[in-house]
Structure formats: C-alpha cells, structure tokens
Amino acid sequence: MTRRYLIDTNIFIELKNSYYDFAVCPGFWDWVKWAHAKGKAYSTRGVMGELVAQGDELSDWVHDMPKSFFLGLPQDFNVCKNQLLAWAKRGPYRNDVVADYISGVDAGLVIMGISTGYTVVTHEKSSPFSKTNIKMPDACRGTHVDVMMGMEMLRKEKASFHHRG
C-alpha cells in the first residue's frame, strides 16, 4: 500500500531556513515534486497561501509546483470538520481556542487527513494538556489520523539527496 502525505507549512519553512536550503540541498525540493508525481506527497491550498505569503524562494517554488499538489476542500469537508470539532470540544481547550483553530490552516490539514486517510507531516510538538493551543499531532491522534515528523517521512520513503557535483 502506498502511503500518502499531507505536508505542513512548517516543514517547508523550517527546512528552507536550515539544512535543506534551496542552494544547499535542491534534492529535497526535487524529491517533493517527484513524490507528488508518484501520488505520494500533497499539501493543501491553505498551506499554499502561507508559503506564497513568504515572498521568497518558497513562493517561487510554490508557483513551480503542479497545482494538483495543493488540495482543495474535500467533498466530505463538513462531516470531517464536525469530527475534528467534536474532538476539540471534548478536550481541555477554551471555546475561543477551538473556534480559532477550526478555521485555520492546521485544521484544514487534519480535516484533509480525516477525509483521505493521508498521513500529516509536521514539525509541531504535541501538547495534549494545553488549554490555549491545539497542536496538530494531538488533533491528528484524537481523530485517528496518522502523523509524523518530516525526517520520519523521508526515512520511510528512503529519500536520499546526492551531490550534483
């Protein structure tokens, strides 16, 4: 079975700003495009908006990616959103925190994960006892969506980046 991934904004921004800078490791960015062509890697239009707002190389990269990489709302959006909302309301979170979260980009990734069964890839850290901040790993686990860190995805996919010399 092919595992499919939904990649969070923070993966792209943090990697671009560190070890996988476009000039240092173009292989990562090529791999994402390759993985999408193989039907393995996606993100959402909400993430696309956050990346374009960077106004830098990441914005250029977004414009070079196939439009199919950034998924729109699933047909069962309301059903999946209600599942996420029910989970969040059962948690320790304040009502205003839930309302803000449910309309945000992170919730969109979780909702897409609920709908598609794809694994969410994020660098966010779990914080299950927070009352003021819903973290994506907690929302994923609470709604039975697989979640992992970026390096875990690359290892599972046996990605490797070679010097172009």
Image (tube, grey):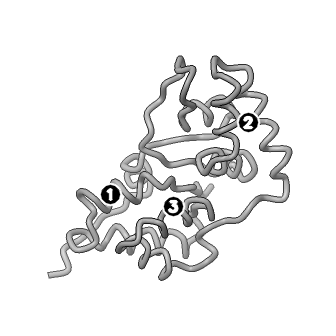
Q: Which residue is mark 2?
A: 84
Q: Nearer the viewer, residue 55 or 159?
A: 55
Q: Residue furthest front?
A: 96
Looking at the rendered structure, the kind of residue marked 1 is: Leu
**Disc 1 element:** helix
Observer-side mark, 2 or 3, equals 3
Tell me the residue at 57%/61% (across/down).
43
State the CA–CA distance, disc 1 to disc 2: 28 Å
Q: Residues within 10 Å of mark 2 (few under 14, many from 20)?
A: many
Location of the C terminus (image quadrant):
bottom left
Location of the N terminus (image quadrant):
bottom right
Mark 3–mark 1 CB contact (< 8 Å): no
For marks 3 and 1, the one nearer the N-term is 1
For marks 2 and 3, the one nearer the N-term is 3
Q: Nearer the viewer, residue 4 or 10?
A: 10
**Disc 2 element:** helix
State the CA–CA distance, disc 2 to disc 3: 22 Å
Tell me the residue at 25%/69% (across/down).
25
State the CA–CA distance, disc 3 to disc 1: 15 Å
Seen in the picture, residue 36 relative to 165 is either above or below; the reply is: above
For marks 1 and 2, the one nearer the N-term is 1
Q: Which residue is mark 3?
A: 50
Residue 151 appears at what percent x and percent y? 36, 49
Q: Nearer the viewer, residue 59 or 16?
A: 59
Looking at the rendered structure, the kind of residue marked 3 is: Glu
Residue 148 relative to residue 46: left or right: left
Residue 96 relative to residue 59: left or right: right
Label number found at residue 15: 1
